[in-house]
Amino acid sequence: MLGWAIFFLIVALIAALFGFGGIAGAATSIAQILFVIFLVLFIVSLLFGRRTVA
């Protein structure tokens, strides 16, 4: 999932360099959404990954 977020971030940056506002805006929105999802899943995995079953 982090790979997709980084991919869309790079696409957004390249599109911004060329001045494609619509493409850059869409790719930036997707990158932000995927980044937030990744961050939440990362925190959840940190919290629940430490627990051991007795």
Image (spheres, rainbow, N blue to C red):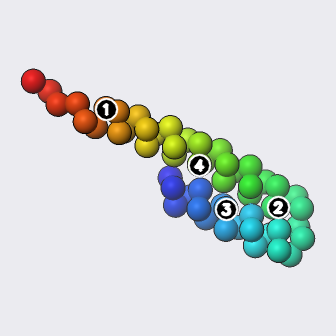
Q: Would you name the residue on which mark 3 appears?
A: 9
Label 1, label 3: how far apart the Cα atoms are = 29 Å
Taking the image as shown, residue 28 lies to the left or right of residue 43, namely right
Residue 42's place in the image compared with 27, above or below, is above
Q: In which quarter of the image is residue 44?
A: top left
Look at discs 2 and 4 and give the one toward the viewer.
4
Taking the image as shown, residue 3 lies to the left or right of residue 22, namely left
Identify the secondary structure beneath mark 2.
helix
Do the CB atoms of the residues marked 2 and 1 lie less than 8 Å apart?
A: no
Q: In which quarter of the image is residue 11?
A: bottom right
Q: Where is residue 33 in the image (x, y as percent from the top left)?
A: 65, 44
Q: Would you name the residue on which mark 4 appears?
A: 35
The residue furthest left is 54
* Few, some or many residues within 10 Å of mark 1 (<14, 14–19, 20+): few
Residue 43's place in the image compared with 5, above or below, is above
Q: What residue type is labelled 2?
A: Ile
Q: Would you name the residue on which mark 1 appears?
A: 48
Do the CB atoms of the residues marked 4 and 3 lie less than 8 Å apart?
A: yes
| Among numbered discs 2 and 1, the one appearing first in the sequence | 2
Q: Which residue is drawn at 66% across and 61% down?
A: 8
Look at discs 2 and 1 and give the one toward the viewer.
1
Residue 41's place in the image compared with 18, above or below, is above
Label 2, label 3: how far apart the Cα atoms are = 11 Å
Identify the secondary structure beneath mark 1.
helix
Taking the image as shown, residue 39 lies to the left or right of residue 44, namely right
Look at discs 2 and 3 and give the one toward the viewer.
3
Q: Residue 23 carries which label?
A: 2
Q: Which amino acid does label 4 sit on?
A: Phe
